[in-house]
Image: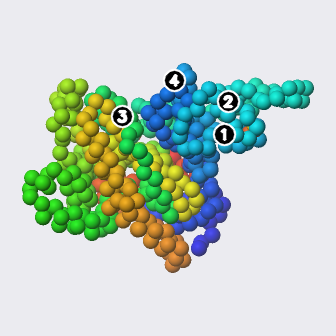
Amino acid sequence: MQKIPDRNFDALVKPTKLHRSLYTDPDIFELEMSRIWGQAWIYIGHESQVPNAGDYFTTNINHAVPVVMIRDKDDSVRVLHNRCGHKGAKVVDKQSGTVRGALRCAYHGWSYRFDGSLLKIPNEHGYQDTGFDASEPCYSMQPLAQVSSYRGFVFATLSDEIPDLVTWMGGAITCFDNLCDRAPEGEVEVAGGVLRYEHDCNWKFILENLNDTMHPMVVHESVVKAAESYIATLPPEAAKQRREAEIIPPFGASYENFENTGITGFDYGHHYDGGKTSIHADYSVDPDYHEAMVAAYGETRTREIYAFNTHNVLYYPSLTIKCAVQNIRVIRPISVDRFVVESWSFRLKGAPDTMLQRTVLYSRLINSAMGMVGPDDLEVYRRTQKGLHSPVNDWVEFHRQYGKDRILPDRIEGGGTSDLDMRTQYRAWKAYMEQSYQRGVDYA
Ligand code: FES
Ligand SMILES: [Fe+2]
């Protein structure tokens, strides 16, 4: 493999191609964890996962740094480093649950308020006249550098330099609005559990695949054909009643259909495909749901909400959401060739249960390890991870429709089958790795 000089990211990311070491080099992975995952806003969880004081959810903000999201007694949601101020033990070990009174470390029993401040040290008089000052922040469970939520979705960052969450999301924020506005009450809540799916390949493959519209008709051809053959055996009325019949066949849509969806990219690597249309655009509308929406918003606004129909939205690098299906996937990297995808389903508050049933069905059919679409994608990621060890060619290309992207003041637009999504995320990859964002440089 061609030797890349240290920190020469120009040698790794070109306008239309990437060096294969981005997927195989453990040193690059470690740099990504500190410079991308250690700087960007990372999705932690949804406020509805911690409805009452003392409720918590634990995760890692990158491959290693443990954090805990906890509801405080004043009803605020905190995100704290999950590290004891004494000798460093992880304080909260379970994935989720409720603590009463205070957080208590299992090692020597130091306890903390829900805002992370040190509450009590057992046998404390041994610290007298030692120079120890219990009020110093290092002896608390320290909050993340910045914590913010948007419409209930909680993000945190290890950086105190990255712009605020709303600025960082830019124009992609309208997709969060669309997801929540699809609820008659304007709010969503986690429901139906979480699916965790371990992938034995580099974390970036799934982000590249989200809006890669040149693959569904190839990779998912067999499942689409099997579904269509089965649907053809059903009487017309029965086929309509099966929601699988709406969900699976659009994965086999034509190149022309995918071209027409368009892709829109933003600063910081965010992007979505669709907007005017998507593979979800032809789902039937439950009459009870429509009635509740019209009662809440009126007919015109309801139609506007339905009409903004995106496929996958990426908030680079940790979160992808599906507004029309009320489903999100969260990326949790582990090593250069391992990561976990969490799929969470959301209930539209004020909507009939049939909407949540469709969301959970979608997640099971498409995102689950036992599903019909996600395992197809994992199979091609695995083959790519293996193929990239070949020394015959150091480059992964993304020329499609290069030079045809329309550059607007706050976004870039292009054809649905273009590699605009790749160009968008790898401009951000390079800016994070060069630490340009931290210096406030506009790389565009
Ligand atoms: S390491 Fe937590 S109390 Fe000692
Ligand atoms: Fe796919």
Q: Is residue 179 visible?
A: yes
- C-alpha gap between disc 2 and disc 3: 31 Å
Type of amino acid under label 2: Tyr
**Closer to the camera: disc 3 or disc 1?**
1
Residue at image mark 1: 91
- Which tag, 4 or 3, sits closer to the chain's start? 4
Residue at image mark 3: 188
Type of amino acid under label 3: Val
- C-alpha gap between disc 3 and disc 1: 30 Å
Type of amino acid under label 1: Val
Secondary structure of residue under mark 3: strand
- C-alpha gap between disc 2 and disc 1: 10 Å
Q: Position of residue 173 (x, y in %)?
A: 39, 37
Asked if the residue at tag 3 contacts the one at tag 4, i.e. Cβ–Cβ closer than 8 Å, the answer is no
Ligand 1 within 8 Å of disc 1? The answer is yes
**Closer to the camera: disc 4 or disc 1?**
1
- Which tag, 2 or 1, sits closer to the chain's start? 1
Residue at image mark 4: 75
Secondary structure of residue under mark 2: strand
- Which tag, 3 or 1, sits closer to the chain's start? 1
Give the side of residue 114 with respect to residue 341, left or right.
Answer: right
Vertical placement of 207 versus 377: above or below?
above
Ligand 1 within 8 Å of disc 2? The answer is no
Q: Which image quarter: residue 176?
A: top left
